[in-house]
Image (cartoon, rainbow, N blue to C red):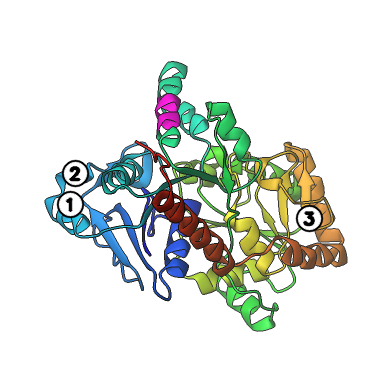
Amino acid sequence: MIIGQFSDSFPPIADGVARVVKNYALWQNTNDDTCYVVTPGVPGNNYDYPFQVLTYNSFSIPFKRNYRTGIPQLDRHFCHALKEIKFDVIHSHSPFPTGELGRKIAYEQGIPFVATLHSKFREDFRQYLKSELITDLLIKRVLYFFNHADDVWTVSESAVDILREYGYKKDVFVVNNACDIEPKPRTKETNDIVNEKFGIPNDVPVFVYVGQHVWQKNIRLILDGLKLVHEKNVDFRMIFVGDGDKRHEAEEITSDYGLSNKITFAGIIQDRDLITNIYSRGTALLFPSLYDMSSLVVKEAAAMSCPAVLVKGSTTSLGVVDQENGFLVENTAESLADTIIKIIDLPELTQEVGNKALRTLYSSWEDSAKITKERYSYLIHRKNSSSYSFGS
């Protein structure tokens, strides 16, 4: 089986979609199956992977730092290389240029086309375009994209509701995100690595955030909550991992709050061993996002028995029970601060919750890849053995 993963987001971009696509390709490019990734190229980046990555000429997106786009049809070398591949199935991870290219190639080759909804596009459009009219028009275009897929996937049961809000009425296949971190016990050695790198005392609780530094992720709530914790003379350290449009503003707020000696903005970290050690050192992951559908970082933290603090009722809190396999808070700084202090004051409870997070929330990409490949095979068989009409 020859599989094409088409995505507008791929490393070195450090977001959830990029990690999903990378891990799909790693685990689908096995045995007799071959997986290609198609994505906008990032100048100077080394795409040295066990699978082949086809990139096209691209340019930066002005309002989304670190992201790139382009017109793939204008890159002649790329188009020539792509035409040489006879895919069996194509899977697109966004309705933008790369994803739309995948849809067109699937139609031309008469093969199944799969599309996954990873993001709350309406919120993105509103944030950057400041226009309900344009947002509604773009959502119609998104709906057109998914309506012309042969199989539509989402990353959680609760994410299906987002598709329904957009007007999608067909069946939806759910494939939960997984984790590329192998569970292992916490050790003094790994804790020492993090302590030394970030200047953290051995006995101080450490909280962690991993993800884009944008207001949609609710990172302002983290800063406001930590300010209240600090005002109650409770000691802690906080590590923000990642980057984004609002990182500079978040750093300014941190300085205004007098927290610069307690909060570190570490930037993008590509070293997965270091990320693993940070989770291991973490007392808890602070992830109050109302934007994410099924956050990878919650599962990554769970792999290292680091419990997540999430907002009650958020999409990404699905499967988390308060003080059993995670902590749930109201969407207020006061609620977050109270929970952080509880986590610090009750280390045995926190450890128990973290251990249960490992047992109940962790899953591997190897298991996820088996599910995806079985679904691809089913779609190929359905196409070849019936008069089923695939997307146009």
The chief SS type of the magenta part is: helix
Outermost residue, left side: 76
Residue 294 position (above or below residue 165): below
Q: Which residue is mark 2?
A: 73
Left or right: where 189 falls relative to 312: left
In x, y percent, where is residue 95? Answer: 39, 39
Q: Type of residue at label 2?
A: Gln
Q: Are marks 3 and 1 in contact (CB under 8 Å)?
A: no
In x, y percent, where is residue 352? Answer: 83, 66
Q: Who is closer to the viewer here, 34 or 337? A: 34
Q: Which residue is mark 3?
A: 234
In x, y percent, where is residue 347? Answer: 84, 65
Q: Which residue is mark 1?
A: 79
Q: Who is closer to the viewer here, 358 or 261? A: 358
Residue 104 position (above or below residue 358): above
For the point 52% across and 64% down, which residue is it? Answer: 369
Q: Are marks 2 and 1 in contact (CB under 8 Å)?
A: yes
Residue 28 position (above or below residue 138): below
Q: Type of residue at label 1?
A: Cys
**Element at badge 1?**
helix
Pointer 2 local density, CA inside 10 Å: few below 14, some 14–19, many at least 20 = some
For the point 45% across and 55% down, which residue is it? Answer: 381
